[in-house]
């Protein structure tokens, strides 16, 4: 039976150390197209949460390439409609991340 500590009704803020930063929209060859849900910057480390692997798959963003463009940026925000970035994954790992795989980022 749940006790009074199970749900905190006095505070609605998130207690998580992570934020959802995107979702895999599409896979093309060895590129994941990640639709953004949180601001990302060059040097950020994100985790892809594969349904086939227990441990998060860590990726450091050295270059941020806007999908359907050759534009490389230092920072990108989800404020633009359907903004997405390309993330290159080794061919042997690409099958770990089907469409709708979640990506997260640790809160600094």
Image (cartoon, rainbow, N blue to C red):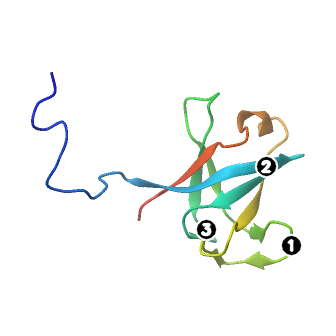
Q: Which residue is mark 2?
A: 26
From the viewer's side, name the closer residue of 104 and 93: 104
Instruction: Name the outermost residue toward the top.
Output: 1
Q: Earlier in the sequence, mark 3 or mark 1?
A: 3
Q: Quadrant of residue 53?
A: top right
Residue annotated with mark 1: 69
State whether residue 7 is above or below residue 79: above
The Cα atoms of the two marked residues, 3 and 1, are separated by 20 Å
Residue at the spot 90% in from the left edge and 46% down from the top edge: 29
Asked whether the residues under the numbered discs 1 and 2 touch, taking CB atoms below 8 Å apart as contact, a structural biologist would say no
Residue occupying the point 66% across, 43% down: 100
Identify the residue shown where x is 78% and y is 34%: 95
Query: Dividing the image into 4 quarters, which one contains the N terminus?
Result: top left
Q: Secondary structure at mark 1?
A: loop
Of the two numbered discs 3 and 2 in the rendering, the one whose residue sits closer to the viewer: 2
Write down the residue under mark 3.
Answer: 43
Residue 58 x %, y % = 61, 48
Instruction: Give the spatial CA distance, label 3 vs label 2.
Output: 23 Å
Q: Residue at coordinates 13% horizontally, 54% vertically from top-left?
A: 10
């Amino acid at each position: 039976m749940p006790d009074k500590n199970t749900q905190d009704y006095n505070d609605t803020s998130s207690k998580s150390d992570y934020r959802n930063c995107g979702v895999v929209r599409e896979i093309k060859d060895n590129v994941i197209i990640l639709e953004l849900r949180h601001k990302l910057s060059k040097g950020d480390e994100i985790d892809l949460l594969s349904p086939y692997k227990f441990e998060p798959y860590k990726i450091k963003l050295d270059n941020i390439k806007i999908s359907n463009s050759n534009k490389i940026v230092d920072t990108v925000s989800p404020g633009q409609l359907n903004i997405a970035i390309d993330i290159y994954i080794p061919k042997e790992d690409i099958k770990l991340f089907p469409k709708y795989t979640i990506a997260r980022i640790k809160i600094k």
